[in-house]
Every structure is written in structure tokens, then in C-alpha cells.
Amino acid sequence: MKILLSYKSLAIVFISTITLLSCTKKEDKDFNPSRYFTPGKISASNGELTASLKWDPSLYLQSPAGYEIEVALDSSFNPVVKQLVADTAGIILTTDDITIKTTYYARVRAKASGSVQASHWEISGSFRITGEQLFNNIVDTDIKDVRATLRFRPEQQLTHIRIINAATLAQEDFQLTPEEIEEGIKTIEGLSPLTVYNALLFNNTLERGSTTFTTKELSLFTYEVTPEDDFLTIIANAASGEVIGFHPGVYDFGTESMVFLKKHVVLASVSGDPADTKLIYKEFTLRGDGAGITIRGVTIDQLNTGGSYVVNLVGESAANAAATFSSVTIENSILEHIGRAIVRGSQGAAASTHSIDFIRIENVWVRDCNNDYALLEIQKLAVNNITIRNSTFSGFNQNLIRYDTNMGTFTPNVVLSKVTINGFGTASRRALVDFNSPVNFTLENSIIANTPKGGAAINNDLYRLGTGAQTFSQVFGYNLMRADGTTPLNTPGQTFAPATLTWTETTNDFTLPAGSPLRTAATDGGAVGDPRWAL
């Protein structure tokens, strides 16, 4: 006990001594560091004609000191390509300072002043001036085999479009007339089929937009038919790989299903315009190994056909018999009044009994459907790739994709890019997609709005994703609610950006208002959602 008291006494003496010394030390009111504090973290923003750098000011920075900025092509700053100074904690770089479409890094420090040394450097992330983008998104119907129609924002300061063959680098300039500049449309003739081209939009030597497109294959039809022809027999007798061209008109197949036994057939409008070529039918049945279909440039109307599929996959000897199909492609088309599904691929006896290389839907408008299956009802189908691009889905039941059979380790790639989806979801389903299996899933540059349809009961989760890589980028949501109309749906693992829209679930015109931020919100600088709504 005596030992404890002794330690306690020493502690009191020590604290008293420190206090006394503190009280007798002269107060130092001025803080004079030998070096300025390093600026705070730099934020870099890309722009069409400028790039901006902002940073938190250095502590205790005094006039006349400011900031030194050095710009380089990589983060080693060897060499430095541009030196600048600033009086405030930020600077705007223009095309006079740096080259457009070139990646740069910057570092910033507080300048030396008097006896105070310069601070240490703070280094930014990468940034660039992106260059103007006056080109609108390319719509599939504007690209043909030997010509392309390019659309751009009407602008007086334009002179010509340069077309560059991406493979040979051969280039040609096409001058813009005053009428073309005012309308914002230029048709380029004399191109080659199946060729990748780069297009650059200029005002004299100043580039004001760029885009890339691929021309279609040369339009060669094996047969051309009219509504007066015996087109059913012609289609039934077509060999694998043959192309049936439909002249404008209405083609009524009746209530019978058209069967493609172990062959892949192409059905396309001669005009390339789905508005003038309509097919009314119940089902195209793909039966057995090698069966597949390409549908291009038509309207498919299944009103009053009952239990209808655009495409139905079945085995050769029986619906559930093993089969390896080729592919399903639907492009530049309108699908309306579907009774069941766009593609039914769920009839295999077990997981992977049926397989297919890919399903591709591009530049398609699916509308006014009363479907009692998912639009892609493909559980149990071993499909390598599903791609849905530049398309609109307005008014459908259940969900977009049902893939809820566990496929083991089989992992398809599913991409939804630049799609507009509105007024959908019923039957207690996960209204967007339901993957109870490994899937590499990408959802990008899209607008998803107004669920559920008609206030129906739906799952509280908008989607279910199995294992696999998942990429969400620039996805905008509007009025995604549970059946109660007040509680937002769950978007597991993600937060969709909110969109300001006036759409209801019955809207059928999704044109983005002039000046809407959605017109420039995509990762490529263009509009999000189906490009047709930004023309």
C-alpha cells in the first residue's frame, strides 16, 4: 500500500511540473511552416471542348503564392507537355492547351513564396477533352448495304463529313449543302457492303463529331414474293441459307405454324421498312439440329392468333428431344400483340437438352403484348449469347427474360444495351429478368420505367441475377414500384439513376425532349435508351 502511494505522489509532482512549464512558455501566435501544405485531392472532369481540374486549397496559402500545374501524357510526368499557373483552386483547360481525344494527367502544387517552399505535388486521375459530338445515334434502318444516312444536330458551323474505311484507311469528304445542315441529315452513297466505316463531322478543319457504322450485307434474295403469290409453299420449300424477300403488303399465314426442319431461313422485307410489310401468323417452329431463323424489316402481328410464339424451338422427333439449333436473329422489325413469347426455348427434357449459339434482337419495337409467358421463355436452353440492343419494349406481361432453371456451370453472356422498357411486369414475377443460374450480365445506357403493368402483383425485386460477371452502366429508372404503388422495387446491388419523365404505362411515344440530359447521358456521349427516340 505504501508503494502505491509513492507512485501516486510522483505522478502528481510530474503533472504539476509540466503545467508550470506550459504556463511560463512564450505563446507563439504565428504558424510559419517551411513548406506549404499539399493541395487536396484533384477532381478532373471531361468536356466536349474543355476539361476542368478542381482541388481543395492548400492550408495557410498566402498571397502572392498560387498554384503550379503541370500536364503530361502519363503519370510519370516525363516529359511535361504543358505548364500553367492559377490563383484559385481550379483551372479550365481548352483546346489551346491540350489536344482533343488525348488522355492526360495533371499534378498541382502550391507555389513557393518568400521563405516558404513549394508544397509537394498532388496528382490527378486521367482526363481528356472528348471533342464535340454533334452526331446523333445511328439507327439500324439508316444503314444499308451501299449507303448510310447520318443524322446530326442542326448547326450552322458545319462544312463536310469525312468517311474513312476502317480497314484500308481510304477516305472521302462529302460536302454538306445548306439544306442538309438545316435538316441535320446527310445520305452517303457508294459504300461497300459489310464494311466498317468511321465518319467525322467537320467545320473546316475543326472536328465536331465522330461515329462508326457497319454496312449491311448485299441485299440478294433467293425468292421475292407478293401477297398474291403462294408464299407459304415457297417458304416451306426454301433450302437452308436461302433468303425470302417480301414485297410491301400484308401476308396472312392463317393459324397454321410454319415449320423449319433442320434448316436456317432468312425472311426479310424488300423495302427494309417494317411499316409497309406485315406478317400475320401464329408461330415459326424451328425443329431439330441446325434449325434457325433470321427475321428482318417486317411487322409481325399476332393479334387473335392465340397461344402465339414468334419463334418456338422443338426437337426433331419430339418437342423435348435433344437438338442443337443455329441461331435466332430479329432486327429492324415491329412485334405486336404477342400471345405467349418472342422465343420459347423451354421444352428440352432437361437443362441443356436444347442448345443454341445466340439470340439477337436489335432495332426492334415490341409493343402491346398480352403474353402469358416471359418474352424470352428460355429456361433449360443452353444459349451462348443473348444480345438486345437499340430496342423498345412497351406494354408486356410477366417479365422480359426467364432463365430460372439452374444450368450448373454453363454461363451465357447476356447484354441489354440502349433499350427503352416501359409499362411491364405481372404474375408476381421479377419484372425485368430472372436468372437462377450463372450469367455474365450487362445492362447499360438504358431507361426502365413504369412497373408493374396495371398494378399487378410482382416480385419485390426487379431482377434476380445468378453468379457471374455483372456490369451496370448509365441505367435510368422511373416509377419502378411494387404493387402498392408507393414502395420502390429493389434493384439488388445497384442504384439506378433517377430519370425525369412524363411517361405513363400506356405511353407509346418515348421521344426525349429537346435539351433533356438523357440525350447525352450514355457512355458514348449520346442518348440513353432506344436511339430512335432521340432523333
Image (cartoon, grey):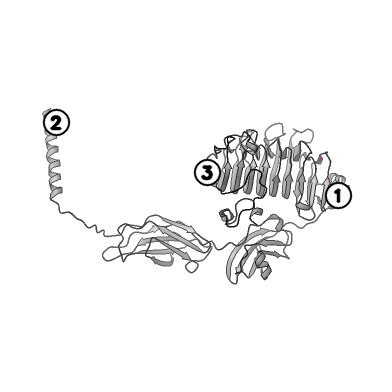
Q: Please identify the dominant SS of the magenta region.
A: loop
Magenta span includes 129: no
Please tell me which of labels 3 and 2 falls first in the chain: 2
Q: Is residue 464 visible?
A: no
For label 2, count other residues whose C-alpha is less than 10 Å away and answer few (under 14), some (14-19) or many (20+): few
| Disc 3, SS | loop
Q: Which mark is residue 4?
A: 2
Q: Position of residue 37 (x, y in %)?
A: 32, 57
Q: Nearer the viewer, mark 2 or mark 1?
A: 1
| Disc 1, SS | loop
Q: Is residue 238 left or right of residue 28?
A: right
- Structural distance between the alpha carbons of marks 3 and 2: 61 Å
Q: Quadrant of the N terminus?
A: top left
Q: Is residue 265 left or right of residue 459?
A: right
- Kindly identify the amino acid type of the residue bearing the numbered disc 2: Leu
For label 1, count other residues whose C-alpha is less than 10 Å away and answer few (under 14), some (14-19) or many (20+): some
For the image shown, how many numbered marks are present on the structure?
A: 3
Q: Which residues are magenta?
A: 252-258
Q: Position of residue 328 (x, y in %)?
A: 72, 45
Residue 132 lies, with reference to residue 338, above or below; the image says: below
Q: Nearer the viewer, mark 3 or mark 2?
A: 3
Q: Which mark is residue 495?
A: 3
- Structural distance between the alpha carbons of marks 2 and 1: 110 Å
Asked if the residue at tag 1 contacts the one at tag 2, i.e. Cβ–Cβ closer than 8 Å, the answer is no
Q: Position of residue 320 (x, y in %)?
A: 74, 32
Residue at 27%, 63% in the rendered image: 116
Residue at 68%, 68% in the rendered image: 179
- Kindly identify the amino acid type of the residue bearing the numbered disc 1: Pro
Q: Position of residue 222 (x, y in %)?
A: 83, 53
Residue 121 lies, with reference to residue 281, above or below; the image says: below
Q: Which mark is residue 227?
A: 1
